[in-house]
Image (cartoon, rainbow, N blue to C red):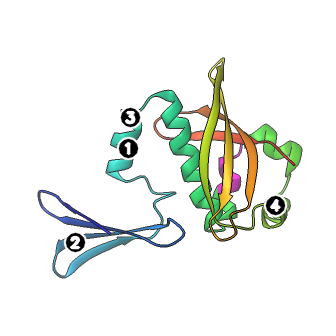
Amino acid sequence: YLVNEKKDSTEYVCMDQYNNYYIFNENLPIDIKIKLDNSIIDTETFIETYNSSSTENKVMLNIDKWIKIINTRNYHNSYEILDETFRNNYFNTEEKFEQYMTQNFAGHYTAEYSGFDESSNIFSMDVSLTDIETGDKKEITIIMQLKEGTDFVMSFSIS
């Protein structure tokens, strides 16, 4: 866990065995707010880090966010991040996407990155996913377009 002392509050950040974060903001001893999903809700720290990052690091941060989303089996939000053309070509319904993900991404993953490339504001990165529980590896390429703020859309290689 990590404790961040702020001007008028204390933030406690905890991580479980699957690299999921749980954030507790204590304003007063009886005023505590809990964030159970930092993959969808951008924290102040994430936004500051993101805004001061290089394009390559922004892509990696977004991939990390997507991996956290699929690790929690949040297929709805994972589907929403997909580029519309990619989504329509491969998974014209959220149910088809969920079926694909449960068959092909059933584990809890960590990522290693290589092969960053840029062409006309479209970025690609090779990602090696390692299942935390089994050690199995999966290689994919992620294509990403950065949008306003911390928003992005992406697609990935289909096996």
The residue lying at 51 percent from left, 57 percent from top is 40
* Image disc number at residue 47: 1
Query: Under tag 1, what secondary structure?
Result: helix
Q: Is residue 36 above or below residue 76?
A: below
* Image disc number at residue 90: none
Nearer the N terminus, badge 4 or badge 2? 2
The amino acid beneath tag 3 is Asn
Residue hosting label 4: 104
Query: Under tag 4, what secondary structure?
Result: helix
The amino acid beneath tag 4 is Asn
The amino acid beneath tag 1 is Ile
Q: CA distance from mark 4 to mark 3?
A: 33 Å
Residue 80 lies in the magenta-colored region: yes
Residue 144 placement (x, y as % from top left): 65, 35
Residue 111 lies in the magenta-colored region: no
Q: Which residues are magenta?
A: 78-82
- The rendered magenta stretch, by its main secondary structure, is classed as helix
Q: Residues within 10 Å of mark 2 (few under 14, many from 20)?
A: some
Does residue 83 appear in this view? Answer: no
The residue lying at 73 percent from left, 55 percent from top is 137
Residue 70 placement (x, y as % from top left): 65, 61
The residue lying at 68 percent from left, 47 percent from top is 128
Nearer the N terminus, badge 1 or badge 2? 2
Q: CA distance from mark 1 to mark 3?
A: 6 Å
The amino acid beneath tag 2 is Glu
Q: Is residue 31 above or below residue 138?
A: below
Q: CA distance from mark 4 to mark 1?
A: 31 Å
Q: Do the CB atoms of the residues marked 4 and 3 lie less than 8 Å apart?
A: no
Residue hosting label 3: 51
Q: Residues within 10 Å of mark 3 (few under 14, many from 20)?
A: few
Q: Residue furthest top?
A: 120
